[in-house]
Image (cartoon, rainbow, N blue to C red):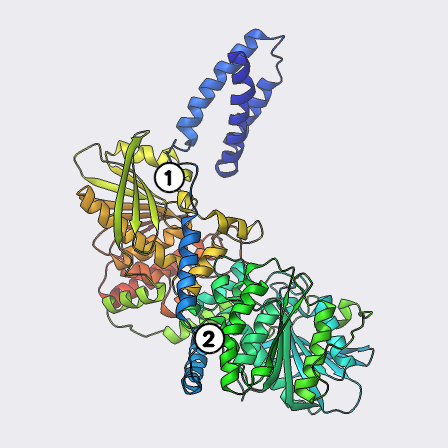
Amino acid sequence: MHGMQWLDSNLSVLLTVYVSEKSKKKGNEYGFLMYNLEIMHELSFDKWHLANLIRNISFVFFLLFAFHFIGWSQDLPDVFGDQRSDVINAQLRHKASLSYQRLTPPGTREEWEERRKELRTLIFEKSRARKFSGLDLDYRVTGQCEIDGGVVKTIYFQTRPGVYATANLYIPEGPGPFPAVITMMGHSTDGKLYDMYRSVGFELVRNGYVSLHIDPWGAGERTTTHGDFEYHGAQLGAALLNVGETLLGMQLTDNMRGVDLLCSLPFVDASKIGATGASGGGNQTMWLAAMDERVKACMPVVSVGTFESYIMSSNCVCEMLPDGLNIAEESEILGLIAPRAILICNAEKESNQAFLPGEMLRSLERAKPVFDFLDAGGKLQYQIGSTTHGYHPVYREYLIGWMDLHLLGKGDGSPRKTEEYLLPEKQAMMVFEPGTRPEEVMNTIQYCKWKREDIKRELAGKIFGNASEKRKQLRGVLKIPDHTILYKEYKYGPLNGWIRYALELSDGSLLPVLVKPPASGSGEFVLIGNTEGKASITSEWISRIEKEGKGICLVDFWGLGENSSESAKRLNGNHLPEFHTLSRALMWLGNTLQGVWVREMEIVVDWLMEEFESQGISILSNKDLGLASLFFTALNTDKIKSLTVEDVPVSYLFEEEIKEGFFTMGVHIPGFLEWGEVSTAVALSQTPILFINPRNLDGTLFEDENDFMRTLQELNTKWLTESKVEFR
């Protein structure tokens, strides 16, 4: 193609795309540039040769202008090249395999009895589930609808002090007392209204069982806006971690209270309680039966596998137990159900690796000796249906046969023929008219705000020892892997003016690093990290630092840029936030992403100081990684000259919704607000900090600067520290 034609057809397109992206961030000045670009394209190449020449010369000037004024991303070389291995995937799977191998059930009945007590204590501690057996249920009925063989009452009741859950209560015709089954919902956004679960309720009523269907925390009628159904996991469910809760524990608490409710009803036989559910509901079934011995028989559907297989899978945070793979494997959770009855149903056509029949059988074989110790070998059974993922009719047939045998002593457990039902309109089974939900039925954001204020009241006026003690507590909250050290340094040839390194760490990580030593003799370095990866760092940042004569170090920390996991990205897809898979995996293994990043910063800073004899290091970072930088300076007060953070969360406060796309799942830290706030970490830092566009945790701009500074001053006075903070 002729040179001018190529420039006309390619460069203009390139600039059009580039400027349109920049205009989203920079404003109307780019609209003017785009208008002129469009005018130039209206001229015909064939008719207006002179205009064509002028146009292309204009492109050259336009390009120079764009480089100078907009800031084009630097042509940064890769350290590892285009063809990369998924090191993180291999690293996490290896750690999960080690945990599986290590966590085997005890070999004798005596050992198991001791282990059972210890394990239940640990599960309550890590899940934060609570028993409120003495709390008034305050059971309220808002309506009912007739069904074949019984009635469905629309109810709500108190699950924890001041907090209520919405539910449907299916009741057969007749005086009772009836056996009852608590039926737990999976990941249907409409919760108890999902047709598969309503069909389970109808089947149970037809066969003489009461069935309680509670909306899972954050789903059904417990969503952010009543009547607008949404997914209860991702950022929403993970937000509970920061206030010291887990979505798993919230649901376990609800379900234990559901058993309280069933046992309180005069038409229910409290000695004959069963439990069932599919997917996330099957997971709840397993945990409820393991922790509440009032459940005499259970049937989890398409939900049992191994905890090992949860790593590098896209399971919901409601199926995540922080530190879980340092406590137990799934086989021991199944063992906690013995000597009561459990029928595990998995699907032959399952697509989620965590629930594959092969993974279920691994856990079942390990759990079997525990049932044998307790003379209950026949009460651990399984079925593999020729279905896809879901509570299909075949599992309803298994359910009735299993409950009849183990709750009523009737039959031999064989499947009972099921029926299809004409279901009522969903509206008829809602507890409240859309938009009329009372305040006590809290959604996740309301609960987090309420719990945050409750924590603040508890912490008010307390002095948490000295600054050194508070820093030690922060290391514990962040789960910083102090045992991780620099194992080996690899140096590659220079490319595009950058020296390329790879730093291998003792935990199996490999950090790609680009370095430009300082041009002057100052020995100063700026460490730059970007939550979108170093390829997103603009030349504006780099050019400014070079002009100052400082050295530059660019790092793709764990999970970022060249150090990312393609497997995790595929699992996240388009519907889950960044780091959904990786953040969950780290928590299962007893870490946090913030803690991993802080430790890597410590290693890189020490390496810079030793390798280049740096006389001073500053850090420039953004968003989630900026938060880790704040924690780093709080814990390493004498290593950093200055810190600049952009779009960083300086408060764990929510407004009315969570913006899924702004921060990643990496910002969530179990129990963080029980330790303090971001201002607490800043108060521990002696480093000058510049905040550019500070944010709340929901991504909205932070506007409480005065309150932040007032809190900072109070903490500085308590700990005799001095914080140097500027907002811009």
Seen from the viewer's position, the closer of residues 340 and 154 is: 340
Circle 2 Cα neighbour tier, 10 Å, few/some/many (<14 / 14–19 / ≥20): some
Residue 673 visible within the image: no
Q: Position of residue 330 (x, y in %)?
A: 49, 71
Kind of residue at badge 2? Arg
Of the 4 image quadrants, the one containing the N terminus is top right
Query: Residue 98: image x %, image y %?
Result: 39, 64
User: Does residue 10 appear in this view?
Assistant: yes
What residue does disc 1 label? 80
Task: Between residue 616 and residue 192, name the one nearer to us.
Answer: 192
Tag 2 secondary structure = loop
Residue of label 2:
128
Q: Position of residue 631 (x, y in %)?
A: 32, 57
In the shown orientation, is residue 649 left or right of residue 227?
A: left
Say whether residue 404 is left or right of residue 685: right
Across and down, in percent, residue 68 comes to 39, 27
Density class for disc 1 (Cα within 10 Å; few <14, some 14-19, many ≥20) is: some
* Label 1 SS: loop
| Up/down of 483 relative to 554, above or below | below
Residue appearing at x 42%, y 53% in the figure: 90
Q: Amino acid at mark 1?
A: Phe
